[in-house]
Image (cartoon, rainbow, N blue to C red):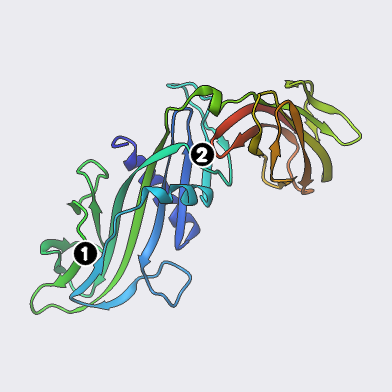
Amino acid sequence: MKKTVSLLIIVVFAISLSCGCLETSYVALYDDHVEGCQEKYIIYDAGTTMPIPKQVTLPYTFSVPLCNPNNAREDFQNAFLCTDFTGCTPGQECNGTPCSNFILPSNYRCQVRTLYRLQIDYALEGTIYVNGIPFVKHASPLIIDIVENEGDIISQNKIVGIPSSITITAAPGASQEAVLLVTQICCYECRQKSIPAAILYPKVDIEAFQIVGGDTIIQDGKVLSSFNISPGTQQTEIQIENRGFFTQNDVRVRVDGLPQGITLDLDPGVQKIKAHKIGTYNATFSVDPDVPSGRYPVVMTAFSLNGTYDRIIVEVVVP
């Protein structure tokens, strides 16, 4: 995690700048782990819905709690940007597949790093103190990073070690008025606990995918054709088969990589499938008329909160 946290922080900063959000996050899925960061503005002008600095009088003190690894599931599920790199070959360029509403499996355990970014602006050039450490303002605003470890981020102004509180003071005789913007960033790396393969992969497979009253795209787990879809709505069915000997109480389906303008509504969203039985999901695809023509590879996944059961790549064709 030490090697990747700097890159994750750069990504989440870029997302925040592009959306102007008070809270945003990024998650990336890999074959052996899940990682991502969540950024939240904790001190800002509360009278706005944008991250605008708050007017403060120095000295000013605020608490700095550490991030909680148990918050990873909620932060990942609400991620502003989600990219699935599973199946990519290590060492080769791979752009991944867009994903959404990712639910971290319950058998994953997470590590977390905490970072605080302070943006301080005040009227005069000079020195300002953060927990007694002097920083000289050369540009507006003065940016100071508070990190857990030396290598977490490359920054000209940095304090290593997360204190329980931060106090900002001005030099004697200087202006005591400043504007302050403080960001908390939580970066997670989550890996699967070692559990028996028979429990994690209990023979639950994607059995079939077919257009209601029309073509069959997947049959017996094999792709037979592309999924041709035109503007409007298309009713389809996705069937998941439980070939194991135990009832699966939490079987879900998702389709990742759909182009912008195509949405999917699944009913039911989750269901119980008994041993040697098939569960059917009514899948309604809605296509906007301005979706560009093209061939779009998407990933259909059968999964539960404990992990992934089966994945199949299907080509969506928009004429």
Query: Which circle's residue, 1 or 2, is located before the other in the chain?
Result: 2
Residue 217, position as x, y percentages in the image: 79, 27
Q: Residue furthest right?
A: 213
Count of numbered tags: 2
Q: CA distance from mark 1 to mark 2?
A: 34 Å
Frontmost residue, 121 versus 6: 6
| Residue beneath the point at 46% across and 55% down | 24
Q: Which residue bears the numbered disc 1?
A: 165
Q: Which residue bears the numbered disc 2?
A: 105
| Residue beneath the point at 51% across and 25% down | 88
What is the three-letter code of the residue carrying label 2? Pro
| Mark 1 secondary-structure assignment | strand
Residue 238, position as x, y percentages in the image: 76, 34
Residue 209, position as x, y percentages in the image: 78, 30
User: Above or below — where is 76 with respect to 165?
Assistant: above
Frontmost residue, 214 versus 8: 214
Residue 297: quarter of image: top right
User: Above or below — where is 237 with respect to 62?
Assistant: above
Residue 188, position as x, y percentages in the image: 38, 43
Q: Is residue 241 visible?
A: yes
Between disc 1 and disc 2, the foreground one is 2
| Residue beneath the point at 30% across and 51% down | 114
| Residue beneath the point at 57% across and 31% down | 308
Tell whether 190 sits left or right of 234. left
Pointer 1: residues within 10 angstroms few (<14), some, or many (20+)?
Answer: few
Tell whether 215 sits left or right of 76. right
What is the three-letter code of the residue carrying label 1? Ser
